[in-house]
């Protein structure tokens, strides 16, 4: 076994020992809201949003972007599990700001190995094989956090499967302070209309 696997399994054993009545939590989130946020390990939505197990749905992906799959999850969250408010939360110093779709495609076309970055930019080993499949994915990179939050809130709000009665709030998590900073234009774009 790997060291990480051993650590995860040991942590799980400790968690199980204190599991208590969590097995009785209801399937729908108790506080009836969902958060779409980034997968960045520095973000802990349970802490920055004051969540306990069973409170809310948390959907995470690279950049916290409103991809088709993220919207699919939000729609299921509402339609089948009753969430009534949604938050889209990006963050400062996001890795999705460090590259473009073109850079990602170039790196993946060259090799599937882990790339590196330095002052001159991204580098790949070039020890192929790469994959042309990367050319068919929109990597949803970020140029500006406020603009990307507004773009994602607008995309969710205007999606034909999203009912108008769900408010969609737009925020940026500040990695230096832990503060959630509203993006007023995004929250305005995400207002419930009925």
Image: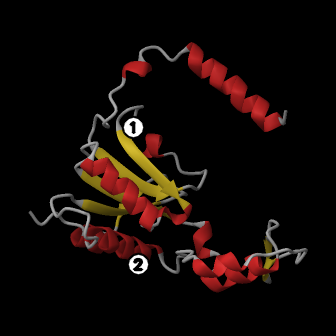
| Whether residue 158 is situated above or below residue 164 in the rendered picture | below
Left or right of 53 in this view: 136? right
Choose top left, top right, bottom left or bottom right for residue 160.
bottom left
The residue at which mark 2 appears reads as 147
In the image, residue 151 lies at what x, y percent? 37, 76
| Whether residue 22 is situated above or below residue 112 in the rendered picture | above
Question: Mark 1: few, some, or many residues within 10 Å (few <14, many ≥20)?
Answer: some
| Whether residue 1 is situated above or below residue 150 in the rendered picture | above
Left or right of 161 in this view: 99? right
Q: Is mark 2 on a helix, strand or loop?
A: helix
Question: Mark 2: few, some, or many residues within 10 Å (few <14, many ≥20)?
Answer: some
Q: Nearer the viewer, residue 95 or 106?
A: 106
Tell me the distance, in whole angstroms, between the alpha carbons under discs 1 and 2: 27 Å
Q: What element carries label 1?
A: loop
Check contact, mark 1 vs mark 2: CB within 8 A. Answer: no
Mark linked to residue 51: 1
In the image, residue 185 lies at what x, y percent? 28, 74
| Whether residue 176 is situated above or below residue 32 in the rendered picture | below
Quadrant (top left/top right/bottom left/bottom right) for the C terminus: bottom left
In the image, residue 46 lies at what x, y percent? 45, 40
Tell me what residue is drawn at x 32 percent, y 37 percent.
29
């Amino acid at each position: 076994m790997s060291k990480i696997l051993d650590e995860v399994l040991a942590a799980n054993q400790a968690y199980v020992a204190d599991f208590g009545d969590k097995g009785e939590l209801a399937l729908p989130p108790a506080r009836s809201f969902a958060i779409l946020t980034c997968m960045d390990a520095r973000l802990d939505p349970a802490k920055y949003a004051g969540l306990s197990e069973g409170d809310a749905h948390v959907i995470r992906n690279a950049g916290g972007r409103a991809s088709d799959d993220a919207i699919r999850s939000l729609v299921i969250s509402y339609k089948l599990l009753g969430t009534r408010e949604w938050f889209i939360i990006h963050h400062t110093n996001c890795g999705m700001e460090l590259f473009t779709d073109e850079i990602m495609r170039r790196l993946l076309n060259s090799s599937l190995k882990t790339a590196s970055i330095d002052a001159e930019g991204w580098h790949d080993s070039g020890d192929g094989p790469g994959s042309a499949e990367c050319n068919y994915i929109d990597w949803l990179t970020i140029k500006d956090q406020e603009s990307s939050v507004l773009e994602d809130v607008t995309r969710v709000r205007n999606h034909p499967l999203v009912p108008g009665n769900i408010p969609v709030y737009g925020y940026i998590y500040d990695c230096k302070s832990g503060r959630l900073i509203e993006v007023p234009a995004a929250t305005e774009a995400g207002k419930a209309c009925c």
